[in-house]
Image (cartoon, grey):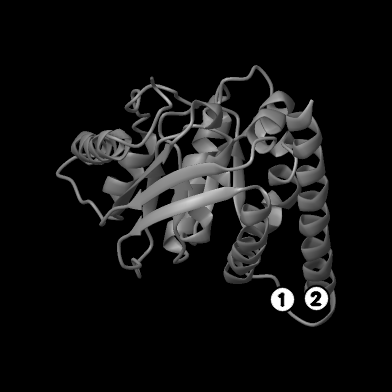
């Protein structure tokens, strides 16, 4: 009961903050300034900087110096907080499954702050997503995606989808690996719907997360690029878990 009340109050406050900033941004871009990806990313950074402490998110970040060139960021996918943590540090369009569009907070601000929605079971949608990735990279912006294609609560990653690595290799863009790990089992996506996950996630006092962003990776083939990225993430996850995470006990 306490967790449900706490979660509800937090969500109300966060919705208010997101709505306020999105409304101000909407008015500004309709009157004084033009919307650009950079401004959308800045808005996302500001919102996350405010709401993460409200949600009790405690981050231990290990960040490689900023990469100046367009790249594909690839990350393991643990749970709900994967959308709240990395984008305080990374300016990139986000490739997310279509169901995310219906999530509170995330879906509401997605179009402005750079989320591309993909229907995983729709071949035409996946093809369009790959074309959009290339278009974004060639425009000078980066893309962030979860190559597992779904949330995974094992110690290391499950098989990656190779499509984005094929595009990175074909067009000569680097891949930057990102590892995210959580201290508590409660932070993993274990519920059967998004609303239960929200209440479970944000009803507790705090969530402790570690995130590590690696250096750009180049490969001799799409598979090598994918395998090297996966190996880096898996190695980092196991290092993070040692002596710290109780999520897999």
Closer to the N terminus: mark 2 or mark 1?
2
| Dot 2 alpha-carbon crowd within 10 angstroms: few under 14, some 14 to 19, many 20 or more | few
Q: Which residue is mark 1?
A: 34
> Along the line of sight, which residue is nearer the eye, 125 or 52?
52
Question: Please, is residue 148 above or below residue 27 in the view?
Answer: above
Q: Secondary structure at mark 2?
A: helix
Q: At 46% from the left edge and 44% from the top edge, which residue is drawn?
A: 209
Count of residue discs: 2
> Along the line of sight, which residue is nearer the eye, 128 or 99?
99
> Going by the image, does 213 lie left or right of 83?
left
Furthest-top residue in this view: 192
| Dot 1 alpha-carbon crowd within 10 angstroms: few under 14, some 14 to 19, many 20 or more | few
Q: At 45% from the left edge and 24% from the top edge, which residue is drawn?
A: 152
Spatial CA span between label 2 and label 1: 8 Å
Q: Which residue is mark 2?
A: 28
Position of residue 158 measured from the top left corner of the image (x, y, whole percent):
35, 23
**Marker disc for residue 62:** none
Q: At 70% from the left edge and 38% from the top edge, which residue is drawn?
A: 101
**Residue 241 found in image quarter:** top left
Position of residue 39 measured from the top left corner of the image (x, y, whole percent):
63, 71
Position of residue 42 measured from the top left corner of the image (x, y, whole percent):
60, 69
């Amino acid at each position: 009961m306490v967790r449900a009340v706490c979660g509800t109050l937090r969500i109300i406050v966060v919705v208010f903050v997101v709505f306020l900033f999105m409304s101000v941004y909407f008015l500004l871009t309709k009157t004084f300034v033009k919307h650009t990806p950079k401004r959308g990313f800045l808005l996302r950074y500001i919102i996350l900087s405010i709401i993460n402490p409200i949600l009790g998110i405690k981050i231990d970040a290990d960040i490689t110096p900023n990469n100046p060139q367009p790249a594909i960021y690839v990350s393991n996918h643990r749970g709900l907080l994967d959308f709240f943590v990395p984008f305080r540090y990374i300016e990139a369009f986000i490739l997310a499954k279509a169901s995310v569009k219906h999530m509170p907070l995330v879906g509401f601000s997605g179009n402005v702050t750079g989320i591309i929605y993909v229907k995983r079971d729709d071949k035409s949608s996946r093809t369009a997503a790959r074309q959009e990735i290339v278009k974004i990279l060639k425009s000078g912006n980066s893309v962030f995606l979860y190559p597992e294609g779904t949330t995974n609560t094992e110690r290391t990653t499950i098989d990656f989808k190779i499509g984005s690595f094929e595009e990175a290799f074909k067009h000569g863009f680097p891949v930057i690996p990102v590892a995210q790990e959580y201290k508590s089992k409660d932070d993993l996506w274990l519920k059967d719907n998004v609303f239960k996950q929200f209440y479970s996630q944000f009803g507790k006092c705090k969530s402790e997360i570690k995130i590590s962003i690696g250096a750009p990776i180049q490969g001799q083939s799409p598979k090598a690029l994918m395998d090297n990225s996966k190996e880096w993430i898996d190695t980092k996850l196991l290092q993070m878990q040692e002596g710290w995470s109780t999520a897999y006990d």
